Image: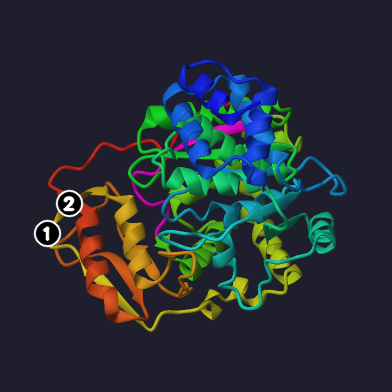
Amino acid sequence: MRAVDLIRKKRDGKELTTEEIQFLIKGYTSGEIPDYQMSALAMAIYFQGMTKRETADLTMAMVNSGDQVDLSSIKGTKVDKHSTGGVGDTTTLVLAPLVASCGAPVAKMSGRGLGHTGGTLDKLESIEGFRVSLNSEEFVKNVNEIGVAVVSQTGNLVPADKKLYSLRDVTATVRSIPLIASSIMSKKLAAGANAIVLDVKTGSGAFMTEYEDAKKLAREMVDIGNNLGRKTVAVLTDMDQPLGFAVGNALEVREAIDTLKGEGPDDLYELCLTLGSYMLVLANVVTSSEEGRKKLEESIRTGKALKKLKEMVAAQDGNPEVIDNPDLLPKAKKVVELKAEKSGYVQKIVAIDVGLSAMLLGAGRETKDSQIDLAVGVVLKKKVGDEVKAGEALAELHVNDEKRLNDALSLLKNAFTISDEKPKGKPLIYEVIQ
């Protein structure tokens, strides 16, 4: 087998066999197939696409390129959740303890952020002492004893994807549905879950800005999971404005605590109930999403969910007092208000610009080596459809370093559109694909 023949075959729109895909991924991971040939293959896939069988084979070839996590010593059906990313995406902080409090084991491996805010791990590290690096024995013990652990990825998981993603990033081949789907699903499958719930976002703050593209991606990932023996459900959700109010690490932890008390933003609360209800169905804790929703609501109402977050924090060496007193979280030195220049209704909030404004304040990483400031970020005071009066606050900027404050303010100001007429409401949940 030669890489050049397989590149030609895919370029001409023909189907690659399982063995050919395995040969390409193995050769690329080991360094026998050079970047320039894999770039050509990625471009051929970008234009010609892949069949469902090819995409499933590509996913498994990437899974098999490195270590796979064995969660068999954890009792129960393990359900993982993945979001395709957005602005103010605090769902894991709420969902992990919430779902665990209802009897489904949550063994979650998360990452750090590169972009407008930190990832889930950075957010959790806002809690004093919280340890994201657990060895496998501690990880399993925590999930078996308290039902939940959220940790950093360990070992050599899916090295083929790391190499291929870096290459796609610099060869304009990122936006290929089969390549995106196999990249996401290979990591989920290697992480060892029995079932997967996907939060696929669409809108101005999402990776897939167009609804139809997001729907295609969701369908592709669900098919991969189901074809490879993992029950998979995708929920298509709106990301035309930030989720919740807070964009920033400690700010999002505070918002997650509020949500688990039943006092959080309506959209974050609703999304977590929807995703969580399907996680409970796939974990065989309930038989319907309606039953799951009731169970989740009860857990929040009775304080069980908040108690579970406290247990998780304590089990990972964090200060559990933070959950009762969020004022112990890192705080910025200064809060600057962005005020409305005219009265009317918030017509639009460009989610990505809110995220970038938070990043300019130090809430996210511009490069892999950037240091995150856990205290800073943006808190929205108004959402789309809200009435606002001239001089009223649209948002707060939580600031430590004022060097880029003016740039952040300017970007945030331009993110808001205010008009005389109240806009039509958009759904938060578009559809569920299973």
Q: Nearer the viewer, residue 239 or 342?
A: 239
Residue type at mark 2 is Ile
The segment highlighted magenta reads 232-245
Residue 359 locus on image (x, y percent)? 37, 65
Q: Residues within 10 Å of mark 2 (few under 14, many from 20)?
A: many
Q: Is residue 244 magenta?
A: yes
Task: Give residue 126's quadrant in the image.
Answer: bottom right
Q: Which disc number belongs to residue 418?
A: 2
User: Residue, x 30% and y 56% (percent of image)?
Assistant: 353
Q: Nearer the viewer, residue 229 or 330?
A: 229
Circles 1 and 2, Cβ within 8 Å, touching? The answer is yes
Circle 2 SS class:
strand
> Mark 1 and mark 2: span between their CA atoms?
8 Å
User: What residue would you read off at disc 1?
Assistant: 342
Residue 242 locus on image (x, y percent)? 38, 52
Residue type at mark 1 is Lys
Circle 1 SS class:
loop
